[in-house]
Amino acid sequence: MSYPQISFEGVTPVFINMIDQGLVELPVFSIYIDRHVNSEKYGGELILGGSDPFRYDGELTYINITRNGYWQFTVDKIRIESSTVCANGCQAVIDSGTSNLVGPSSDVAVINKLVGVITSNGKTIVDCDKISNLPNVDFVIGDKIFRFTSKDYIFEINIYYEIECISFFETSYSENPIWILGNVFLRRYYTEFDMGHYRMGFAPAK
């Protein structure tokens, strides 16, 4: 679902092909991932040619993309309690093929320290009894706050009949200091990809 600039071997991306053939009303697609894990209809929704206002609250906040060909945009800052990372702005991409919130090691280290993460066998573990008291993590995008509570960024998993609580904030080992916002972001925020206007729209998902 990318722009043609980064397509493999110059092959026209499927959605671009659909636009060129007039098969969609608008050069827009959108992604919704159901946050309610106990829902009988648990899953998601991909709309080609528009978005579904019944899947989100309020209005979409639109952000211009900053790199031609990519769904990349500017995050103004990231706040957790009285601390700030990405203080002078940083770049991020939305990637439905990524599960976690993946960021530069220096930023993630600050966040996980404030969350009380302990690294064990490569896993970022949090005391499950403290989840309700963990701080919010706020991504400021377009001067608006996109908040993640501990219920959003901590995942409970049953391993050999024991419950472990894992932080979804993951360190990137890439030399490129960019945030990759995966399905944790998409579950919390409905996302519209507007190819015609080179922008993205976010709103709290229902």
Image (cartoon, rainbow, N blue to C red):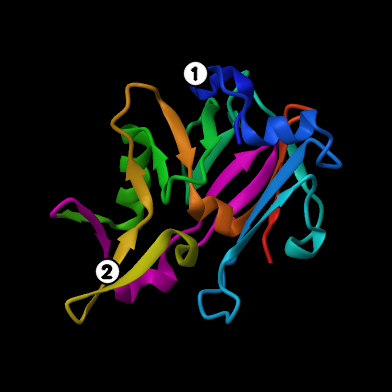
- Against 155, residue 91 (above or below) is above
Residue 124 part of the magenta-drawn span: yes
**The N terminus: image quadrant:** top right
Q: Position of residue 67 (x, y in %)?
A: 60, 20
Q: Amino acid at mark 2?
A: Asp
Residue 54 part of the magenta-drawn span: no
Q: Amino acid at mark 1?
A: Glu
Q: Position of residue 32 (x, y in %)?
A: 64, 57
Marker count (numbered): 2
Dividing the picture into quadrants, the one containing residue 35 is: bottom right
Element class at badge 2: loop
Res. 82 visible in picture: yes
Q: Position of residue 63 (x, y in %)?
A: 71, 34
What's the distance in space between the residues labelled 2 and 1, CA to CA?
47 Å
Pointers 2 and 1 in contact (CB under 8 A)?
no
Residue at the spot 29% in from the left edge and 57% down from the top edge: 116
**Mark drawn on residue 67:** none
Dividing the picture into quadrants, the one containing residue 194 is: top right
Residue placed under numbered mark 2 in the picture: 127
Query: What stretch of residues is rendered in magenta?
Result: 121-149
Residue placed under numbered mark 1 in the picture: 9
Q: Is residue 147 left or right of residue 173?
A: right
Q: Is residue 2 left or right of residue 102?
A: right
Crowding near pointer 2: few (<14 within 10 Å), some, many (20+)?
A: few
Element class at badge 1: helix
